[in-house]
Amino acid sequence: MSLSTQLINLFAATILLLAFAMLAQRRVLTLINLFALQGLTLALSTLVVAVTTRQTHLYWSAGLTLLLKAILLPWILHRLVRRLEVKWDVEPLIKVPTTMLVGIVLVIISFNVALPISQLSSTVSRGTLGIALASVMLAFLMMITRSKAVPQVIGFLAMENGLFLAATSATYGMPMVVELGIALDVLIGVIILGVFFFQIRDQFDSLDIRHLERLKEK
Amino acid sequence: MPTLLPIDVLLIAACAWLAIGLAGVLAPRNFFFISKVLFPLGAAVAVLAGLTSLSYLGGGPQTAVLAIGLPDLPFHLRLDNLTAVFVLLVGFASAGISVFAAGYFRKGEGTAPGLMCLQYHVFLASMQLVLLADDAYAFMVAWEVMALSSFFLVTTDHRHAEIRRAGYLYLLIAHVGAIAILLSFGVMTAGSGDYTFAGMRAQPHTPFWASVAWLLALFGFGAKAGLLPVHVWLPEAHPAAPSPVSAMMSGVMLKTAIYGLLRVSFDLVGTPLWWWGVAAMAVGLATALFGVLYSTVQSDMKRLLAYSSIENIGLLAVALGLTLIFHAYRMEALAALAMTALLYHCLAHAGFKSLLFLCTGSVLHATKERSLGKLGGLIHRMPWVAWLALAGVIASAGLPPLSGFVSEWLLLQAFLFSPGLPHAWLNMVVPVAAAVVALVAALAGFAMVKFYGIVFLGQMREEALKDAHDAGPWERAGLAWLGLLTLALGVLPTWVIGRIDAATTQLLGTGLSDKVREHGWWMLAPISPDRASYEPLIFLVTIVAAVLLGRQLVHRLYHGRTRRSPAWDCGYVFQGPRAQDTAEGFSQPIRRIFEPMFRMERHFPTLRDEKPYYSVKVEDHFWHGLYLPLARLVNGISALITGLQGGRIAIYLLYSFLTLILLLLVARP
């Protein structure tokens, strides 16, 4: 196994580990830091793939990922959390150990599902497809189990990280246009959600999304 | 210069209708322009369309492809003889209705006249397109446009809650029917993805899938036609709509559903099976009996006519069933006879039912009354309407020498030959069906006597009726046109059959025209003159001569004096309008004899009542037995589904999450 493959696998494993860490983390600020770290790892892993395969556009995506997911989005989120004053612990709907156990089951399922696909692929990073799928699932799980709005948005962004990893590992990334588009979407999405946070807080004096249950149609 | 084919003329007619409708919208305030220019223009276009298809009849199929609609999915159109017969019907019937409408609509009632003009002419154009469509896509588009435009026409007076309710019911059932039609087309493509009718014809259908397609079509088109049990919209929508619209819907639109059934049964789905005929006949008999019984007990004149339309649709379904049975047993001559009866009845019903609905419109305008209990004696105030209504009533009751008699006579003739069927069970059952048809015809006569007698004869039940005025010139012209059609269909059956025979021949391979033609134009003998023959003109001349002679003799022998006295005075001392038979009283025997068929709420006066009164309210069994439970079921199911919508984002996310995992696990390579 070549050095690059080993490096890619290492980074992928780190991303998975960080996904678990995010699942278990109850403090919002630490959650954002973990998210930034995941973004950094993702950028590094993309860079390794870019160096190995000499694909120019992958350099661009690595830079974009670094800029957006490791620096810009965490910074926006930090500001939001400070202004909203929601630094305190988040209360998960399900207990953390249970969540972790469900997460392990999800990882097993993801590897099982990804195995036949990665055998068809011929990229250097094909082994990480299962990990990418698993981090998507774990992020999804995080969205389900959190009752506050900010962690849910972080879960959503982490899911995008997982998708990005899957794209890089399976096909050396998506076309540049698509990546740029997604990056812009994520940025705009976070800004809009930030606006929503303020609205939700004004309306319910809290960012607990359980208050939104009242919005359903009678 | 390229020659103008009939199909091109018909397309131009449809475009002309659309243009007329748009012109109405562009000049919404010019009431005179809309009513006295645009509507008569629409009538002229209708006559043009009718004459075109009349001259086309007997020609070969013509096709056209319109590059409108979705990309790579153009409208295929086709004109053949079946289409031509129905275009003829649409053109001639709607011409009379349009002329009538020119004098009927008033300012300031419900929808603005410009919009009304658009809806009306879009409705006409969509019916034309339904008939011409040669692929499922064009057909469904036209069909839906037809349903929507007629929905807006029905809800012209949308300020009344009950009219909105009637319109909603109509739209709902129309859409349920349209889904069934769409599914039927889907089954007939047999998975080939070719939605043109030519593609459907080319598919081999197994008996099972053919039956599925046919049953879906029966349900879907039945919902539009008003077959049991999807008839409930009809008696609600017809009274709600303005009279020309009721006339258009009842006289013309219902026939497009019959057209669809014929198109599917004999053209698209392949060889029909014999039990389809039995099914159509059973549904038709139930519908006809139901319709006629309910029409006898109505006390609202438009509801009475609406139920009578249900009855006529039932008779058409019976004729369809008989045709299918004969056709399935390869008895083509008899199948052609039943099919001729079917097509003839379509034409006849289009004429007389439009006429009657328009007459109710005139009565409504003259008296502001729809309830039979408050009318009476109008023949003195409205002679034009009364005499033309008489023509419609005679035809509707199936009496010679008018149009309804010919078709019902042909149908009964076809029944008389059913003992030749090579199937013992059918041999026993079909004559019973013939007996039911005879009963229906008799009861239809009863309902029509009630309608005519209570509205036009006797004494006026209300003082206000003395101010009733006769219909205006436009209305008279429209009524007279339809009356003439009814008379022509009654007196010239051999000529008409010779024309529409092209459609019969196209669908069945044989026609009646040779047999009909060999006895000369004055005598109609569909099988042989030994069995049965009918000479309408001789009949008419005899009747007219007898009446004139009788009148002359009475005058001569009864010393030439005429004396006016109250109608039905019968020598009683006091005979006021209140002492006449009422609408309820007239139909009381029917209510008593067929009591289980009705759901009645009655209140009888007792001796101790301060203010004694009698009331009877007749309701539809289907409404309480089928529709309300169905509505409750749908509500219950949707309440269950609402449970899914808990309002918690976590739960919503969980739904997608579980779906994702399930799909990942199921869709493993």
Image: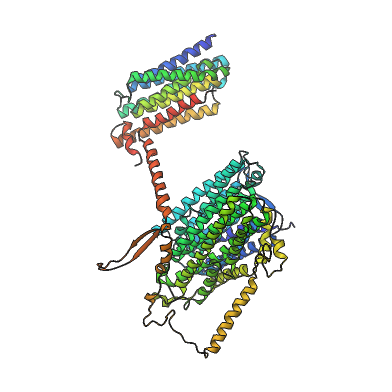
In this rendering, the answer to whether B304 lies above or below A1 is below
Q: Residue B438, position in %: x, y?
A: 54, 62
Q: Is residue B126 visible?
A: no
Above/below status of B360 relative to B626? below
Q: Quadrant of residue B607?
A: bottom left
In the displayed orientation, state which residue is furthest to the right.
B1
The answer to whether any part of residue B546 appears in the image is: yes
* Residue at the spot 47% in from the left edge and 20% down from the top edge: A110
Could you say where residue B484 lies in the image, as x and y percent from the top left?
A: 60, 71
Q: Position of residue B561 (x, y in %)?
A: 50, 89
Q: Residue at x 56, y 43 (%)?
A: B212
Q: How many marks?
A: 0
The residue at 40%/47% (across/down) is: B629
Residue closest to the far bottom: B559
Name above or below for residue A31 compared with residue B416. above
In the picture, residue B538 is in which quadrant? Answer: bottom right
